[in-house]
Every structure is written in C-alpha cells, then in structure tokens.
C-alpha cells in the first residue's frame, strides 16, 4: 500500500469523528497559538525598547549614583547611604571632559498640573539647556527652554503630547499659563507623540529647566547625569575619564553605563522573558500532545476490530502503523497550522496595545514542535495497534 | 502426534489425483488461561484438495473455528505445520502471512466484519488497497465482484443501509476480489434468516463450481451438507471424515422457497 492510500485512510477516519478530531486539535491549536503570540509579544517589546534606546544615539553614557555592580547589599539606587549627584558634579564633569562633549544632569519627579478645572498628575523630566542633545522630541509648537531660563529657574514648561491633549484640548497651549504644584507656569512649547520608552511614557511627561524642577521638588539632587560623546569612538575613553573625575568625590559609589551596556542588559532581561513565555506556552503544547496520544490510544482500542479486519484482508504491520501515525500527525500539523494562523492574527490585533512581532523562528519552532508532538505521541498508539494479533483483534468486542 | 497418517483425503478416498492446496499436519493449539492450559486442538491432520468444498463441523468449543483461524493464517499453531499451496507458512513473519492472506485466502465471517461508515465498494476494495492495486483498477475489480454477488446496484451503500444478507454478500465480494484460491467461511449463515442464508450458500456453491476451494465452518448439519465432504471435529480432534451423499443445492432451495412464498401470495 502506498503513502497516498495511508493518508486517505487516515483522513477518512478523522472525518468520521469530526468533533473528537476537532477537540483534540484544539489542544495543539491553543498551544501553538500561545507560543506564537507570547513570543511575538516578547520579541515586539524587546525590539521596541531596543529601538528606543538605540534611538537615543549610540554615543550616550549614563552616570548613576550608587554602585549597581555590587548587588543588592551594595547600596543600589534609592539606597539611603548613597550620596546623590548635584548640578555641581555635572558642571565639574563638563569642565573635565571639555566642551566637545555634552553633559546633561537630569532630574525626574512627580507633579500635579492644573488648568482651569482640569487636573492631572504627571512626571517631570528636567535638564539643562542641552537637554535637546540627549533626549529627542520633535517640537510641534513653541520652543525649548533657554540657558537664561535654566540659570534663572524660570517657571516655563514644555508639554508632552498626552498632557497637552488632556489640559489644552483643541487649543494652542503656547503662551498660556497653568498651575504646577500650585505655582504659575507659562507654557513655551509642546512636543509630538513619541510612544513608550525606557523611562516610561514620554508623552505623559512635562519638561522644564532643572533648577526650576529642583526647587519645585524641594531637592538639590540630580537623578542621573547623561553624557553625549562627540563621536561614538570617544565613548570608551570618555567612560574612563568620567570615572577618574568622579572617583575622588564618590569613591566607587557610582555606576557608568554606556548605551551599549544598557542595551545589552535590557536585551538579556527581555530575552530571558521571551524564553520564559515560550516555555510556558511550550508546556501547553506538550499538554496538547498528550491529548493527541490519549485520543489515539482510545481510537486504537475502539477500532481494534477494524484493525483485525484490515489485517485479515492483508494489511501489514507497516500499513496499520502508518495509518495511525498519519492520523496523529495530521491532527497535530493541521492544529499547528491553525494555531499559527490564530497566533499571528492575535498578534496583529494586539499590536494596537502591545508591540508584537511574529518571527520566523517562532513559527518554525511552533510548527516543528507540533509536528514532532504528533509523531512522538502518535507512534506509541500506532505501534500498539500494528502489533495486534489479527485473531485477537477480530475477537475484540 | 505429528506423525499420524493423513486422515483427510485418505479416508474419503476419492479423487486422489487432485492437488492438495491446504494442509495441516499435527496441528495443536494450547491457550494458557491463568493456571489452566486449554487444549483447543490436540493434533489435527487435514488435507484440502484444490477446487473442493469442505465443511468443518462440530459443536461449539470443538476447536473448529480455531482450526479455521490457523489454516486461514489468522492464528499460529502451538505445534505442527500449515502448508498452503506447497509452502510451509508456520514460520513466516506476520508481514509474510499478511501477504499470503491477501493474495490466496478470502474470509467470510459470521458477523460480516465490514468496516462501518465505509461504502460497499470501498469495503470490497480494501484487500486490493493492501495488494497495491491502483485506484481505477481497484474500483473496476471491486464493482465486478459486487456484481458477481448480485449487488451491482448497492455500490455506494454503507453497511448499516444493507440487510444482513446483503452485508454478507459484500463480505463474500471482498473475499473473492483478490481472486484467491481458497475462501474460508465461518458460520456464514449464522446471523441470517433462511432466505438470505440460501442466497449466501448459493453464492458460495457457485464460487466452488468456478474452481475456488471453499471451506465452511459450521455446527449445523444442514449447512454442512452443502459441501461435498464433511470433516467432524470434537474436543480438538478429527473424529470423522465423510463424503456427503445427498448434497444440498442452495440454489434449488432458494428457488423452492421463492416459489412457495410467491405461490402463497398469488
């Protein structure tokens, strides 16, 4: 008997039990769809964060107070014993590194905004007049804050897209006044929507001179110092010079991250996360496979008589074996294809809320795995069926 | 046991010139049921000549079905040998046995044993599928076989749409579609009313006239006497081997019944 006949017999048997075949496939469908979807989300998020970090430019260096490399006991960020940077430290760095490199101290903190009867809580990202060198942002209207405003702690504010939409719907906010933590500020500009990034939702943010923000938040601390090297080739040397400049004051209680290191760190974390998601989905695929084995075993004992008849009229061991293996493989491969389609469709829908990316390797993995599940879990019942003694099988009631 | 003189053709004596097509020598079959050994066959010698029609007769539990399964290569003897057309088959692998069953032996069972949810045509095609015959050739030969048993108009019917007699005729068509040399029929009329039974027996007798060796297994003397020779089995041994003196013609019986019922209605 040839292979095509085996396929025809297997398909006919599956068609005779449509509901059961469908439910068995459902296990594989859900497993494969879960693998595709979860890996798509993992990859999508990873790509977006990678992209947003890379978008900042590869010649960026971040300096944080506290030693991140010593582990949890070493006084990480927020650790009480850690001495924070101040604007003076940033000025020192700027002097040491030279004017071809740009040093930007950054302060972040929560704020309450009010315009008329509209109120919202948001985050401020404050820096000096060189903020534009480090952080992107396309100005749709108005302008950035100037050096004079930084030194005068001027009450000027630039709005992110979400903030602008909430507080000044259908209105040009430039030149308007608003209340920030109870103080009167003038809006000087607003930026275009940028989407999420590693510092949170950049659109739900406002920007102002660092001196103004420090006064509002009641602090002289600087959260981090960003350094932009003149060229990407300077990054390594600059890292060393930053260490030299800060060690006398801070010992080893600070951490220098290059863009590349940050990227590597995030990729490592997100990569692990993606594998974890794939693993969880893989377990459901395994469960689906066991479902196939279960059904195939039931099918073999239910059809013992049929196997007996086939053997009586001349079916060989191989004929019976291939019939049942093909049934199992068909269940899992059809289930796999439907699962891939469903997973990809789900990923396409989810893109509206979460970045997703259906990768070839995830599809290949899910398909190979589901076909493998079919073969693996189909072989044992098929072997059992093929070994049946014809007369025992015929007598079976 | 294996060295006992051959009873079969020796006792019935005639037409020794005919070729022996199927032979059992010293066949025993022992089942282990828990701690008890059940001896279903205790040394059976049997020779069946080409083109004959023979009945294996005995009460239930006599071992006649076991013997049929062994000479039909569905089961293996515990001891002894089975020779089909001069070939010793007892030591063949399961796949070799499958090929012999496929090419040389046709089975007709008491319970029909058709594949459910499968058309008459597809059921008859089944042995040809395993023989590797191509699709169109298969359909043609299966159709011919069904026409031969008078079911040319029932090709697409499923078993549950056919009467018992019709199902048994599909089974006979399936048995003869590979043009086997031997048809083994195990209580072929056991599940049928008498009219269907006459039809089925008439077909089997007709096959025999056309040269196919037919072995009937039955406990019923009136069925057994359709054959030319009756081998009686009891307690796993051959206890009698006789020629049928007044052989029954199923076709005559069928016509007689048809006349009676036809006359009654008129």
Image (tube, coloured by chain):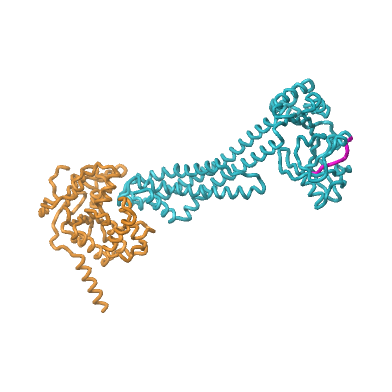
Q: Quadrant of the C terminus of chain B?
A: bottom left
Left/right placement of residue B67 relative to residue A186 reads left
Rendering colour (chain A): cyan
Q: How many marks?
A: 0
Q: Nearer the viewer, residue B42 or A133?
A: A133
Q: Position of residue A187 (x, y in %)?
A: 85, 44
- Find residue B172 and report its image quarter: bottom left
Where is residue A259, by image quadrant? top right
> Which sits in the foreground, A40 or A379?
A40
Expressed as whole percent of the image width and height from the top left, the position of residue B139 reads: 32, 58
Residue at the bottom extreme of this rendering: B266
Horizontal placement of B109 versus A356: left or right?
Answer: left
Q: Position of residue B191 (x, y in %)?
A: 29, 61
Q: Position of residue B67 (x, y in %)?
A: 23, 50
Residue in view at x 61 percent, y 47 percent = A347
Visible in this render: residue A199? yes
Quarter holding the N terminus of chain B is top left
Start-end of magenta stretch: A152-159
Asked whether A155 falls inside the magenta stretch, the response is yes
Name the residue nearer the viewer: B25 or A324: A324
Chain that is orange in the image: B
Q: Is residue A294 magenta?
A: no
Residue A110, compared with residue A80, is above or below; it is below
A2 above or below A96? below
Q: Is residue A211 left or right of residue A302?
A: right
Specify whether residue A78 is in view.
Answer: no
């Amino acid at each position: 008997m040839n292979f095509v006949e085996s396929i025809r017999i297997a398909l006919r048997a599956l068609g005779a039990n449509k509901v059961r075949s469908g439910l068995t496939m459902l296990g594989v469908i859900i497993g494969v769809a879960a693998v595709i979807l979860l890996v798509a989300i993992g990859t999508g998020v990873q790509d977006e964060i990678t992209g947003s970090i890379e978008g900042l430019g590869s010649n960026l260096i971040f300096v944080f107070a506290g030693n991140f490399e010593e582990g949890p006991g070493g006084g990480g960020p927020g650790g009480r014993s850690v001495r924070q940077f101040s604007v003076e430290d940033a000025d020192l760095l700027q002097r040491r590194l030279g004017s071809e490199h740009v040093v930007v101290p950054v302060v972040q903190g929560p704020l309450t905004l009010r315009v008329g009867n509209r109120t919202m809580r948001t985050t401020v990202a404050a820096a000096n007049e060189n903020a534009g060198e480090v952080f992107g942002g396309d100005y749709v209207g108005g302008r950035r804050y100037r050096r004079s405003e930084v030194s005068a702690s001027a009450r000027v504010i630039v709005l992110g897209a979400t903030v602008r939409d909430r507080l000044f719907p259908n209105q040009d906010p430039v030149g308007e006044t608003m209340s920030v933590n109870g103080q009167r500020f003038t809006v000087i500009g607003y930026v275009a929507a940028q989407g999420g990034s590693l510092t949170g939702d950049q659109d739900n943010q406002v920007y102002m001179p660092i001196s103004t923000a420090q006064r509002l938040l009641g602090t002289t601390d600087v959260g981090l110092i960003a350094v932009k090297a003149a060229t990407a080739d300077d990054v390594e040397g600059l890292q060393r010079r930053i260490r030299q400049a800060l060690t006398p004051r801070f010992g080893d209680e600070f951490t220098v991250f290059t863009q590349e290191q940050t990227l590597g760190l995030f990729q490592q974390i997100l990569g692990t996360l993606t594998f974890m998601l794939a693993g969880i989905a893989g377990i459901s695929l395994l469960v689906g496979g066991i479902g196939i084995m279960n059904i195939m075993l039931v099918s073999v004992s239910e059809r013992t008589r049929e196997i007996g008849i086939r053997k009586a009229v001349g079916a060989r061991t191989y004929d019976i074996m291939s019939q049942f293996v093909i049934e199992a493989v068909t269940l899992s491969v059809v289930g796999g294809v439907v699962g891939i389609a469903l997973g990809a469709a789900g990923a396409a829908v989810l893109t509206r809320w979460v970045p997703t990316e259906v990768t070839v390797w995830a599809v290949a993995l899910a398909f190979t795995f589901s076909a493998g599940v079919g073969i693996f879990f189909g072989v044992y019942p098929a072997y059992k069926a093929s070994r049946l003694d014809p007369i025992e099988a015929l007598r079976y009631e | 046991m294996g060295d006992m003189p051959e009873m079969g053709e020796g006792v019935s004596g005639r037409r020794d010139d005919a070729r022996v097509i199927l032979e059992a020598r010293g066949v025993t079959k022992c089942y282990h049921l828990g701690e008890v050994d059940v001896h279903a066959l205790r040394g059976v010698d049997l020779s069946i000549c080409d083109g004959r029609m023979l009945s294996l007769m005995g009460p239930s539990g006599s071992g006649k079905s076991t013997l049929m399964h062994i000479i039909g290569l569905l089961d293996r003897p515990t001891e002894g040998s089975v020779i089909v057309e001069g070939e010793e088959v007892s030591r063949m692998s399961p796949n070799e046995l499958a090929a012999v069953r496929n090419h040389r032996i046709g089975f007709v069972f008491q319970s029909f044993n058709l594949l459910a949810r499968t058309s008459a045509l597809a059921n008859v095609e089944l042995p040809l599928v395993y023989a590797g015959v191509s699709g169109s050739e298969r359909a043609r030969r299966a159709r011919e076989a069904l026409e031969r048993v008078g079911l040319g108009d029932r090709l697409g019917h499923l078993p549950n749409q056919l009467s018992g007699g019709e199902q048994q005729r599909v089974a006979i068509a399936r048995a003869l579609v590979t043009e086997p040399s031997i048809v083994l029929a195990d209580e072929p009329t056991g599940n049928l009313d008498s009219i269907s039974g006459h039809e089925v027996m008439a077909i089997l007798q007709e096959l025999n006239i056309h040269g196919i060796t037919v072995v009937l297994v039955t406990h019923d003397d009136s069925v057994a006497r359709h054959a030319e020779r009756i081998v009686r089995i009891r307690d796993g041994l051959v206890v009698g081997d006789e020629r049928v003196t007044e052989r029954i013609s199923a076709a005559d019986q069928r016509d007689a019944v048809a006349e009676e019922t036809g006359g009654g209605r008129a």
